[in-house]
Structure formats: C-alpha cells, structure tokens
Image: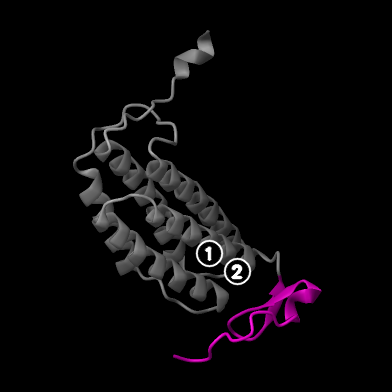
Amino acid sequence: MGNRLSKIYTRTGDDGTTGLGDGSRAPKDHVRVEAYGTIDELNSAIGVLIACDIEEAIAELLTDLQHRLFDLGGELCIPGSVAITAEHVAEVEAQLDDYNADLPPLKDFILPGGTPAGAACHMARAICRRAERRLCTLADAEDINPQAVHFVNRVSDLLFVLARVINNSAGDNEILWNSDRLNR
C-alpha cells in the first residue's frame, strides 16, 4: 500500500480549493469536484443500502459496484485518466438483464419506498441520477470519458431494478403512481 493517511486535516483546503489527483488545485465547487463528490455520495448511499437486510448476492454485487464507483471517482479526480470502460458498462447491463428478467412488467410509474432496504435503494438511485447530471455538466465543460456517463446511467437503472427486486422478494407490493388523483 502507498502513502497512508495518518493526518486527516491538512489545512490546504481552507482557501476554498481542493487538490486534484494530478497535483493541480480547483475550487471546491468546481464542476469536476461536484461530479466526483456526488459519486462519493452515491457510494455512501450504497453503503447504507448494504447495511440493510438484503440478499447476500445483492450485497456482493453492490460491494463490487462500490469498488467500481471508487475507480470512477479516481478517474474524475485525475483529469484525462480513464478507469471506466465499455466492458464495465456491459457488465452492468448484463446484471440489469438478469435481475429484471423475473420482475413483473411495469405499466405505470412506481413511488419510491417499500421496505427500508427498497427505500434505501431508491434513495441511492436518485443520488445516482444527480451524479449523472453532474457528469453531463462536466462533459459540457471539459472532455471526459463518455463511458463514465454511460456507466452511471446504467447504474441508476440497475438500482431501480434492484429496488424492485428487494421489495418484491419481501412481498412488499409496489405502490403505483396514481395519475387519476389529479382529476379529482
């Protein structure tokens, strides 16, 4: 292992900047910092989900996903680096297909919620969508790896499907959005 973090505070960020992986500094609210910061928030939300009562196979999948998201955060922290590939996107697509295969088809939108684990998964999905928006903002400002955006988009879909799997396996009926209530 490389350098260990023996001292957590450095005071170098007291001026409102943070160090990037290439040694440069950027404002803490820079679009790049917002993007990898939101990936970190997503990773933390997935950690909360893993701490819930979920199937071991889903916990393992999510732990692997956390590692990949950490790789993505590193990619975003070092301008010009690439850690996410088309193969990583294809892996998530295969997981999506596997978990979605046995779910009942959706005819309406569902409300986020269900079991505590299902609700945590929906929360992670919503954070993932924000991370995707931050990546798109970064991509508009700078050249980034397009696979990063594709990957995060698929992860949000996977989290949606996993929320459905978690809730369905617990016997928790999904609450469909009732658009008819608008006509009352």
The residue under the point 39% across, 35% down is: 114
| Callout 1: SS | helix
Residue 84 percent coordinates (x, y): 40, 71
Q: From the viewer's perspective, is 180 left or right of 30? A: left
Instruction: Compare residues 11 and 70 and report the one nearer the observer.
Output: 11
Neighbours of disc 1 within 10 Å: few (<14), some (14-19), many (20+): some
The residue under the point 38% across, 42% down is: 118
Question: Is residue 141 visible to the viewer in this orientation of the structure?
Answer: no
Residue 41 percent coordinates (x, y): 54, 59
Q: Look at mark 1 in the image and give the residue it sits on.
A: 40
Q: Quadrant of residue 89?
A: bottom left
97 shown above or below 176:
below
Instruction: Compare residues 12 and 117 and report the one nearer the observer.
Output: 117
Magenta region, mostly helix, strand or loop?
A: loop
Q: Look at mark 2 in the image and give the residue it sits on.
A: 142
Q: From the viewer's perspective, is 65 left or right of 44? A: left
Q: Earlier in the sequence, mark 1 or mark 2?
A: 1
Q: From the viewer's perspective, is 62 left or right of 31? A: left
Q: Which mark is residue 12?
A: none
Instruction: Compare residues 150 and 58 and report the one nearer the observer.
Output: 58
The quarter of the image holding the N terminus is bottom left
Amino acid type shown at disc 1? Asp
Q: Which residues are magenta?
A: 1-27
Label 1 vs label 2: CA separation? Answer: 20 Å
Amino acid type shown at disc 2? Glu
50 shown above or below 176:
below
Residue 135 percent coordinates (x, y): 54, 60
Question: Is residue 114 visible to the viewer in this orientation of the structure?
Answer: yes
